[in-house]
Image (cartoon, rainbow, N blue to C red):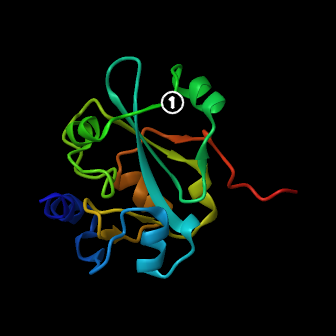
Amino acid sequence: MSVASVKAYLRAFGKEDDVQEFPVSSATVELAAQALQVIPARIAKTLSFAHKDGHGILLVAAGDAKIDNAKFKQQFSCKAKMLTPEEVIACTGHAVGGVCPFAIPDPHTETYLDRSLLRFSSVFPAAGSANSAVEMTCDELYAAANARGWVDVCKGWQTEA
């Protein structure tokens, strides 16, 4: 019932009716881009990490961005250790493929947005299942994700000068 919980959560932000559900999988950046007919970079993927304090860190980044381990360690004072699929469910309430920064049951989980998203007028995070998404501006995403801040912990998305 993850999509239902996300829709209920997004009602407070006026985005409940914007959740799209697809007859095909959107569990990866590539599949989501195909389902939405957008470039992969506009998919706002949510990555789940373990913090040294024991709580979860959710990082929402552009679909073409990759974690820069040195930047991550500098920002969060720990190595970028991804959660196991079981830990992801416990931390986020969503299964891998549908992880999003909405309706997170663990109050200790912190969400951050990577600046790789800022080059787009709107992006598409998942909406709690492996076949859903919701279009949002970066400001809407920031608010709905209850983000702690914008960070610069990714690489591979910048255009060479």
> On the rendered structure, is 139 left or right of 95?
right
Residue in the picture at 25% in, 59% down: 128
Residue in the picture at 20% in, 46% down: 93
Image quarter (top left, top right, bottom left or bottom right) of the C terminus: bottom right
Q: Is residue 20 above or below residue 98?
A: below
| Residue 115 location (% of width, % of height) | 60, 49
- Which of 98/125 is in front? 98
Residue in the picture at 61% in, 24% down: 74
Q: Is residue 108 above or below residue 26?
A: above
| Residue 14 location (% of width, % of height) | 27, 69
How many numbered callouts? 1
Q: Is residue 76 above or below residue 64?
A: above
Residue in the picture at 42% in, 67% down: 136
Q: Which residue of the protein is positioned furthest toward the right in this rendering?
A: 161
Q: Secondary structure at mark 1?
A: loop
Q: Is residue 78 above or below residue 82?
A: above
Mark 1 crowd level (few <14, some 14–19, many ≥20, 10 Å Cα): many
| Residue 129 location (% of width, % of height) | 25, 62
> On the rendered structure, is 90 left or right of 33?
left
Image quarter (top left, top right, bottom left or bottom right) of the N terminus: bottom left
| Residue 113 location (% of width, % of height) | 49, 47
- Which of 61/89 is in front? 89
Amino acid type, callout 1: Ala
Residue 133 occupies which quadrant of the picture? bottom left
Q: Which residue is mark 1?
A: 80
> On the rendered structure, is 42 left or right of 90?
right
